[in-house]
Amino acid sequence: KDLSPMLTSDAIAERICEILPFNEWKDEHLVITGGEPLLGWQRAYPDLLRHPKMRGLKEITFETNGTQELQKSFRDFLIAWQQPPLGSPKTNEVTFSVSAKLSCSGEARHEAIRPDIVCSYEEVGYTYLKFVVATEEDAEEAIETADIYRAEGFTGPVYLMPVGGVESVYALNNRRVAELAMKNGLRYSDRLQVPLFKNEWGT
């Protein structure tokens, strides 16, 4: 998001490689976040991902709110990107980390909850739902919402994540959210950067 409005794909690929530990792709995982990374950028990604400096990349995650349909050309590109040469094992993987917005976000529910779109992501790559919760009411809504996705055919895992970009807020509810996840048969997603780095930029 910071680089794409002003730099070419060549320059973005160069900048990414500059910050990799070995200045080239080895075992690193590219996470594309936002804003909403599937809104308005889909035609640009293939050009970047085809760049010679991106050739060693094996894992991509799109952190999305799950409301943006995949354009056919981009969908076809992602499927092809994951196909290994004949007789070779699969190495490339695409993940969709879907943070569907609950009512506490202020988003209109009919716009925020789109199980049809999220189910279409599952046809392309590994997909999971993640709900950010602060209260027991949020968790109850998350569970009810997950059931709506399940009814539409969603098969991926569902995570609860505690709210809190700073340690003081995060520490108030992380254990409670973990207990709610266990109680309801869901997975728990930590915010590891908060206790380790206090959510500092660049960590």
Image: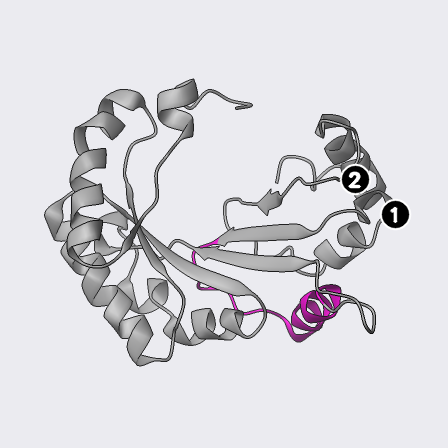
Residue at the spot 32% in from the left edge and 72% down from the top edge: 149
Q: Quadrant of the N terminus?
A: top right
What type is the residue that disc 1 sits on? Pro
Where 130 sits versus 174, above or below?
Answer: below
Q: Residue at x 69, y 58 (%)?
A: 92
- 1 vs 2, front mark: 1
Would you place residue 31 above or below residue 119 in this image? above
Q: Is residue 10 visible?
A: yes
Residue 98 picture location, percent across and down: 43, 57
Q: Secondary structure at mark 1?
A: helix
Task: State the mark number for residue 97.
Answer: none
Packing grade of label 2 (10 A; few <14, some 14-19, many >=20) is: some
Horizontal side, residue 56 vs residue 59: left or right: right
Disc 1 residue crowd, few under 14, some 14–19, many 20+, Cα 10 Å? few
Residue under the point 37% across and 25% down: 194
Instruction: Please report the bounds of the magenta region as a residue range.
Output: 64-82
Label 1 vs label 2: CA separation?
9 Å
Within the image, what quadrant is residue 110 found in? bottom left
Q: Position of residue 41 (x, y in %)?
A: 64, 55
Disc marking residue 52: 1
Numbered label attached to residue 13: 2
Q: Nearer the viewer, residue 28 or 114?
A: 28
Looking at the image, is mark 1 or mark 2 earlier in the sequence? 2
Looking at the rendering, which quadrant does residue 29 occupy? Answer: top right
Front-lying residue, 166 or 24: 24
Residue 79 position in % (x across, y down): 68, 70
